[in-house]
Image: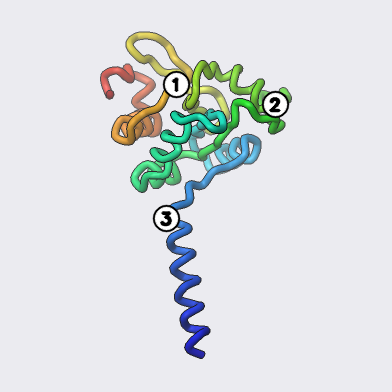
């Protein structure tokens, strides 16, 4: 009986620890479907394997405040820019590596935001219209970007005024 109680407590702890570490991510097709049905914006993390800056960005995504904000306000999709995952976007078939070009990914990591209907969110940064944000971003700055998109500030405020 004592062993069962210990096993139960250890199981609960593992579930709790696993939930605090895990970032909820979805495949591209699954994420778009979920975003539409839940009326949530989409955050796409475009990455490549074995890249130092993508790995550092993953640590930002995993930080408690960022992880919680993303889980509460976005559907989070990770898209490997070198991947062969089959994706459907705007009724066309792409591989992941083809799709990232459609989103204008010019370096890695790149962050792309979509509306619940899967249309690309465009915003101004230093007066220039953008549809993706490339590069590693520190946690405090990334949180500002997430809030900028989630609260619709992008509709009337230049990102440079927020950062």
Q: Residue furthest top?
A: 127
Q: Position of residue 33 (x, y in %)?
A: 62, 39
- Can you see residue 145? yes
Of the numbered discs 2 and 1, the one sitting upstream in the chain is 2
Q: Quadrant of the C terminus?
A: top left
Q: Which residue is mark 1?
A: 134
Residue 4 x %, y %: 52, 84
Q: Residue at 56% of width from left, 19% of height from top?
A: 103
Residue 62 lies left or right of residue 114; in this view the side is: left
Q: Tell me which numbered mark, 3 or 1, is placed earlier along the sequence.
A: 3
Residue 95 is marked as 2
* SS at mark 2 in the image: strand
Q: Residue at left 47%, top 58%?
A: 18
Around disc 2, counting alpha carbons within 10 Å, would you say few (fewer than 14), some (14 to 19), or many (20 or more)? some
Give 151 or 64, whichever is nearer the viewer.
64
Q: Are marks 2 and 1 in contact (CB under 8 Å)?
A: no
Image mark for residue 20? 3
Q: Nearer the viewer, residue 136 or 26?
A: 136
Residue 106 pos. (x, y %): 51, 16
User: Residue 123: which numbered mark, if any?
Assistant: none
Q: Residue at x 39, y 29 (%)?
A: 149
């Amino acid at each position: 009986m004592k062993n069962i109680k210990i096993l139960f407590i250890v199981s609960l702890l593992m579930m709790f620890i696993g939930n605090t570490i895990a970032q909820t991510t979805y495949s591209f097709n699954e994420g778009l479907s979920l975003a539409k049905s839940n009326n949530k914006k989409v955050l796409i993390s475009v990455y490549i394997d074995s890249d130092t800056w993508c790995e550092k960005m993953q640590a930002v995504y995993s930080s408690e405040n960022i992880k919680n904000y993303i889980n509460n306000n976005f559907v989070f999709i990770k898209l490997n820019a070198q991947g062969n995952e089959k994706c459907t976007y705007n009724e066309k078939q792409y591989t992941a590596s083809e799709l990232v070009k459609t989103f204008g990914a010019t370096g890695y990591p790149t962050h792309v935001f979509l509306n619940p209907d899967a249309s690309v969110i465009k915003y101004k940064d230093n007066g220039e219209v953008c549809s993706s944000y490339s590069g590693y971003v520190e946690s405090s700055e990334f949180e500002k970007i997430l809030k900028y998109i989630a609260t619709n500030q992008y509709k009337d405020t230049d990102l440079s005024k927020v950062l």
